[in-house]
């Protein structure tokens, strides 16, 4: 694991190239408190921010960078055949219902519940590391990014429950 999110962010010219580089690592990168802080520093070098003069577009970029990393940590816990489906789902919530329906019909609700549990455990382990971050803008970006993922997990859980009822 010689590549880490901070290095890749520094080398990437755009969020899309960062996402592609992160996906290429297949979740094999360090992502503990110090790694998060390093990524935050790289982000703040590119997008300097202050509490009094906020650029909301740059704040959203920070949240997106965090989500990219967290999603990769999460999807590394599931079979490769499902990873692209869930990557798409976490960045396009309008695909949740159709993706869940397709997966449920092809692989069954039990399989889908197992995937959800695996994703949830990985998300909770990332939350533990975020809680260790010192207060400040870096932690704020991580909280903003992970909050979005918790919201999507809620929608995902509801979609699975609806499929189970059918």
Image (cartoon, rainbow, N blue to C red):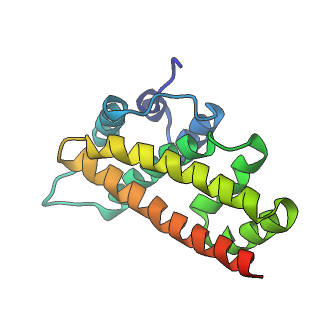
The answer to whether residue 109 of the structure is visible from this angle is: yes
Q: Quadrant of the C terminus?
A: bottom right
- The picture quadrant where one finds residue 163 is bottom right
Furthest residue in direction left, as rendered: 52
Q: Residue at x 32, y 64 (%)?
A: 56
Relative horizontal placement of residue 117, taking residue 163 as reference (left or right): left
109 to 6, vertically: above or below: below
Q: Residue at x 79, y 63 (%)?
A: 103
Relative horizontal placement of residue 95, taking residue 46 as reference (left or right): right
Instruction: Give x and y (percent) for residue 143.
Output: 32, 55
- The picture quadrant where one finds residue 145 is bottom left
Instruction: Give x and y (percent) for residue 129.
Output: 34, 40
Q: Along the line of sight, which residue is nearer the eye, 159 or 12?
A: 159
22 to 85, vertically: above or below: above
Furthest residue in direction bottom, as rendered: 166
Relative horizontal placement of residue 115, taking residue 46 as reference (left or right): right
Furthest residue in direction top, as rendered: 2
Q: Residue at x 51, y 69 (%)?
A: 154
26 to 115, vertically: above or below: above
Relative horizontal placement of residue 143, taking residue 110 as reference (left or right): left
Instruction: Give x and y (percent) for residue 95.
Output: 68, 69
Instruction: Give x and y (percent) for residue 110.
Output: 74, 60
Q: Residue at x 48, y 49 (%)?
A: 123
The answer to whether residue 48 of the structure is visible from this angle is: no
Q: How many marks?
A: 0
63 to 158, vertically: above or below: above
């Amino acid at each position: 694991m010689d590549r880490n999110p901070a290095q890749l962010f520094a080398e990437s010219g755009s969020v899309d190239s960062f996402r592609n580089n992160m996906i290429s690592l297949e979740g094999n990168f360090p992502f503990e408190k110090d790694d998060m802080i390093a990524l935050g520093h790289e982000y703040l070098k590119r997008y300097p921010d202050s509490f009094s003069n906020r650029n909301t577009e740059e704040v959203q970029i920070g949240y997106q960078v965090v989500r990219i990393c967290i999603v990769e940590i999460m999807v590394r816990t599931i079979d490769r055949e499902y990873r692209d489906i869930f990557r798409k789902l976490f960045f396009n919530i309008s695909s949740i219902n159709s993706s869940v329906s397709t997966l449920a019909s092809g692989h069954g609700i039990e399989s889908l519940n197992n995937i959800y549990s695996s994703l949830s455990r990985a998300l909770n382990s990332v939350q533990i590391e975020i809680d260790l971050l010192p207060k400040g803008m870096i932690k704020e970006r991580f909280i903003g990014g992970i909050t979005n993922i918790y919201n999507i997990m809620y929608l995902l859980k509801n979609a699975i429950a609806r499929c189970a009822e059918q």
